[in-house]
Amino acid sequence: MVDLEASAPLSPIDPPAAKSRSSRRSIGVILVLIALVVLLLSQGLLSSLNYFETVDQALAQRGSLGTKVLRLEGVVEPGTIVRTNAGAAFTLTGSGDHHVFVTAHGSPPQLFQANIPVVVVGHFVSSTSAYFVGSQIMVKHTSSYIAAHPNRVRAPNGTSR
């Protein structure tokens, strides 16, 4: 018979030391993933801040804008709205003598009319043209906003809506 107590040590055995390298690697991977998520979120938020260019700014930067899609803001000039089968054609004015002829495809919003500020999504036909092709018309202020703030929306001739 073999005496097991005499042949096997009965003192507790320490577990093998945890590899600190694997825990550092895990922390590193987590930090990289967090950095990637923050980068993606910040880029998404920055690209969603799509401001508009006024008629004056767009005409001044026409060469660098080229035919890139942008949002063009201006006031609809009275007497220039022509309804077409594809949408509407009209002239947007800026300050002074700045005018852009717009052909917008799609149905204009119900509040679309002369002497109101609008934003049109589209592009110039060329880098030297004052002809703008739009795919969407957005009225800058709703009728409830205009009613609540009558002096904030002004047409170029000084009248308020």
Image (cartoon, grey):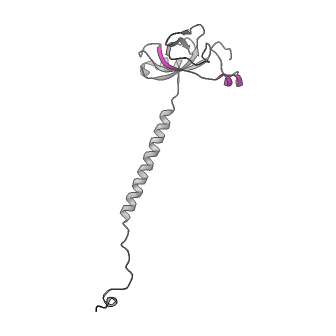
Residue furthest front as drawn: 1
| Above or below, comparing residue 102 to residue 144 in the picture | above
What residue is rendered at 47% in x and 33% in y? 47
Residue 132 image point, x, y percent: 47, 15
Is residue 133 highlighted in magenta?
A: yes
* Residue segment shown in magenta: 127-156
Q: Is residue 52 left or right of residue 33?
A: right
What residue is rendered at 38% in x and 84% in y? 11
Quadrant in which the N terminus appears: bottom left
Of 124 and 58, nearer the camera is: 124
Q: Quadrant of residue 117?
A: top right
Residue 140 image point, x, y percent: 60, 23
Is residue 131 highlighted in magenta?
A: yes
Quadrant in which the C terminus appears: top right
Residue 114 image point, x, y percent: 61, 12
Of 74 and 135, nearer the camera is: 135
| Above or below, comparing residue 27 to residue 68 in the picture | below
| Above or below, comparing residue 80 to residue 13 in the picture | above
Residue furthest top as drawn: 79
Residue 10 image point, x, y percent: 37, 85
Q: Quadrant of residue 13?
A: bottom left
How many numbered badges does the structure rendering display?
A: 0
Residue furthest left as drawn: 1
Q: Is residue 34 left or right of residue 81?
A: left
